[in-house]
Amino acid sequence: MIKLAFMVDTAYVLGFGNKELPFQMDKITVGDHYVAGRKNLQFYKNNIFKSGTILYIVSRSSSSRIKDMVNIKMISDYMELVHKYKDSKDSLVVIGGKEILMLFLPYASEISVIITNKKTSGDTVFKEWKTFNLRLKKIEEWPGGITYYYSKKPAPVY
Ligand SMILES: NC(=O)c1ccc[n+]([C@@H]2O[C@H](COP(=O)([O-])OP(=O)(O)OC[C@H]3O[C@@H](n4cnc5c(N)ncnc54)[C@H](OP(=O)(O)O)[C@@H]3O)[C@@H](O)[C@H]2O)c1
């Protein structure tokens, strides 16, 4: 199963996720393995993942600095992950940034989004997920925002 988990403000600007709202981000990012874009790596360099959990970093190039980090696998062909996890009982959580969220969006079966009332410090708008046919499964309201849990029909993989 592939799940997108991210935070935006009310203008759909992506925030810095776990730095700004650690408790809410921890809730929506529960899963077995993770994938992030190479530009997003700064948020995950203090490796907090449990043993056995893989953080895949999608990049067209390789970097020795990234390779040295534990639990991390560099991957250039994101479709390898789509094939591996789309119908798997293991979950792959897509934690951003926008380029990587866009790559996996068609194949995700779940989308968990935090909408914070506080303006985020980012400048990247991500609202393409709203154009999909989503089924709202759960809403959690908390002081400062709302978390939406959606399911979605994933695109077939050939
Ligand atoms: N709100 C949230 O939950 C959240 C979470 C995370 C990030 N963010 C925000 O997102 C921003 C960063 O996002 P971003 O969109 O700029 O970057 P990103 O998605 O983190 O990473 C982009 C990089 O991914 C690699 N990539 C992209 N498409 C690829 C493809 N088809 N095949 C192989 N590699 C590919 C490239 O790496 P190479 O250049 O190495 O080839 C590219 O430079 C940050 O500013 C942050 O604020 C928000």
Image: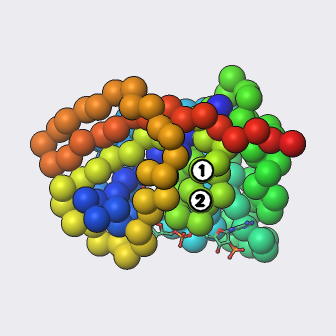
Element under disc 2 = helix
Q: Mark 1 falls on what kind of element?
A: helix
Residue 105 badge: 1
Where the C terminus falls, by quadrant? top right
Residue extending farthest to the top is 89
Residue under pointer 2: 102
In the image, which disc is placed on residue 56?
none
Circle 1 residues within 10 Å: few <14, some 14–19, many ≥20: many
Q: Residue 155: horizontal and vertical position, in percent?
A: 70, 41
In which image quadrant can residue 93 be found?
Answer: top right
Residue 2 makes an appearance in the image:
no
- Residue 68: percent from left, percent from top: 71, 62
Whether disc 2's CB lies below 8 Å from ligand 1 is answered yes
Mark 2 vs 1: CB contact within 8 A: yes
Q: Count the numbered circles shown.
A: 2
Could you say which quadrant of the image residue 36 lies in? bottom right
Pointer 2 local density, CA inside 10 Å: few below 14, some 14–19, many at least 20: some
Which colour scheme appears in the figure? rainbow
Q: Nearer the viewer, residue 75 or 110?
A: 110
Where residue 4 appears, as percent x and y from the top left, is 53, 45
Q: Is residue 9 above or below residue 109?
A: below
Residue placed at 37% from the left, 53% from the top? Answer: 7
Residues at marks 2 and 1, CA–CA distance in whole angstroms:
5 Å
Residue 75 picture location, percent across and down: 78, 58
Residue 100 vs residue 38, the one in the foreground? 100
Q: Quadrant of the N terminus?
A: top right
| Residue visible at 25% across and 32% down in the picture | 140
Instruction: Give me the residue at 39% from left, 45% from top.
Output: 113
The residue most toward the right is 158
- Callout 2 amino acid: Met
Q: Nearer the viewer, residue 99 or 35?
A: 99
